[in-house]
Amino acid sequence: MFETRRLSSKILLQLIVTLMVIPFLFPLIAMVQESLAGQGWANYRAVWHTGVLPDFFRNSAIIAVGTIVIVYGLTMTASFGFAKLRIWGKEIFFWMMLAALTLPEVVLLTPLFATFTRLGLFNTYAAVILPLAALQIPFTVLLTRNFVASIPDGLFDAARVDGAGVTKAFWYIILPLTRPIAAAIVILTLINTWNDYLLPLIFLQTPATQTVTLLPQFFVSEFSDDQTKVAASAVISAIPEVLAYLSLQRLFERGLTAGALK
């Protein structure tokens, strides 16, 4: 690990890092200040007493968990296949999958709307879970493939000698050794799912199914555009993902840097 030894270098580095962080902290500080303006903590009590927060949080939690399960399961199996299994044309399939990263979410709305309407999935959790999972899998596979490729082949050779097949090698070698990258996948998927606005806005039309990203929009009409309470709802909606990141911070950082060296 590189380390700065001179005091001047440490001060300069600290100054640079601080200047880089300020643009990201300023909107958060402004949002918290706005939420406490006027009536202070009473803004949060007013938002909570509407009684709709549990429903919005439940919907977001269901969608987040469903998306994470799909993304994690398919990412691990696909990465294992691309990195360690001999599959004809796997590089072609890999780059075809990466081409999906170039598709913006908005261009998929019309075909998704027609498909979900025909299948009767409109205004259901599946209408958001399935597209969100499909949009995130290419990037998570790209991230995880290098991690899986860095696992020594000798472990798999030893497993074959002991009579283990592909399924047991995946279960007893891949899954235990990929916990750091799994934490990164869980956090990235949680953040992207929790913060997604467009898909819930289009495909979830009733408060019984809507997510926390639509809370500010709901409270604009609920409180006659009282921005202090709208900001309070935005702060409340951000708390779960902040806690999730703080809880898995070390594994998240390890997962992002893993696979860089063999």
Image (cartoon, rainbow, N blue to C red):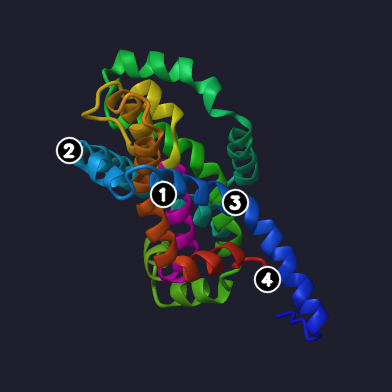
| Viewport quadrant of the N terminus | bottom right
How many C-alpha atoms fall within 10 Å of the one at disc 1: few (<14), some, or many (≥20)?
A: many
Which sits earlier in the primary sequence, circle 3 or circle 1? 3
Magenta span of residues: 173-194
The residue to which callout 2 is attached is 51
Residue type beneath disc 2: Gly
**Residue 116 drawn at (x, y percent):** 34, 19
Which sits earlier in the primary sequence, circle 3 or circle 2? 3
How many C-alpha atoms fall within 10 Å of the one at disc 4: few (<14), some, or many (≥20)?
A: few
For marks 1 and 4, give the one nearer the viewer.
1
Relative depth, front residue between 228 and 74: 228
Circle number at residue 190: 1
Q: Is residue 175 visible?
A: no
How many C-alpha atoms fall within 10 Å of the one at disc 2: few (<14), some, or many (≥20)?
A: few
Q: Secondary structure at mark 4?
A: loop
Q: Is residue 63 above or below residue 108?
A: below
- Mark 4 touches mark 3? (CB < 8 Å): no
Q: Main secondary structure of the magenta part?
A: helix
